[in-house]
Image (cartoon, rainbow, N blue to C red):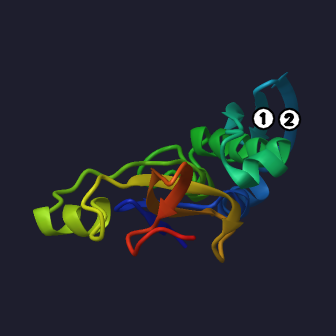
Amino acid sequence: MPVQIHGKQYITVAERIIEAGEDFKSLNTEVLSDKPVVIKATVTTKKGIFTGISAANPDKSIEKMSPYEVAETSAVGRALGFAGYGAVEGIATADEMLKSPVEEKKYVSADDFYEKHICPTHKVQMKERISKTKVDEEGKPLIYWDHRQEVDGKWEVCFGKGFNK
């Protein structure tokens, strides 16, 4: 079943493997590089031999913890996509798109910008931050907005409701 991400339909790697079914003959993966982790997958099906290459992004928490596994899964998915399995709107899989930071361009009203990016207490620009320790229910790092300012010789953090003391 396709997954909708950023307005497009994508198929998971698992679904591509199922779709290949009896056409699937063999799979081989190899590490092309350790820093950064780059994996090449070679898939042989009744249609022929297809390769896919993927690199892990060490800035992402799941890829930092399991870079080889994540890159390998993506490489297999890409190879199967090149073979024509599960390619709905392109070669990328749902797994890849979920790990990829694709920025959607959209109009932001002045009210939205004010509420999200300007501290209502101090009327200064806030910065987007990515938590290095806290994650959401999907395991993705939490994103929050704050600004920092020196107060009485110490740096204080404000999340839009006054400085934490």
Q: How many marks?
A: 2
Disc 1 crowd rating (10 Å Cα; few below 14, some 14-19, many 20+) is many
In the picture, the disc for residue 41 is 1
Mark 2, Cα crowd under 10 Å, few <14 / some 14-19 / many 20+, is: some
- Assign the N terminus to one quadrant of the image: bottom right
Instruction: Please tell me whether residue 68 is drawn above or below residue 50 in the rendered image.
Output: below
Please tell me in which quadrant of the rendered image residue 71 appears: top right
Q: What percent of the width, then of the height, locates residue 162?
A: 41, 72
Left or right: where 43 falls relative to 109: right
Badge 1 marks a residue whose secondary structure is strand
Please give the name of the residue rendered at 57% of the width and 70% of the height, measured from the top-left corner: 165
The tag earlier along the polypeptide, 2 or 1, is 2
Quick one: which residue is furthest to the left in this view? 110
Residue type at mark 1 is Ala
Instruction: Please provide percent x and percent y for residue 94.
Output: 56, 58
The location of residue 140, given as percent across then percent down, is: 63, 63
| Marks 2 and 1, how far apart at CA | 4 Å
- The residue at the point 28 percent across, 55 percent down is 124
- Numbered circle sitting on residue 32: none
Looking at the image, do the residues carrying marks 2 and 1 touch, with CB atoms under 8 Å apart?
yes
149 left or right of 106 in image: right
In the image, 54 versus 111, the foreground residue is 111
- Quarter where residue 50 is shown: top right
Q: Amino acid at mark 2?
A: Thr
Circle 2: element type = strand
**Residue at x 47%, y 68% (from the top left corner):** 163
Residue 80 in the image: state x and y as whole percent: 66, 45
Q: Which mark is residue 29?
A: 2
The residue at 53%/58% (across/down) is 156
Going by the image, does 13 lie left or right of 164? right
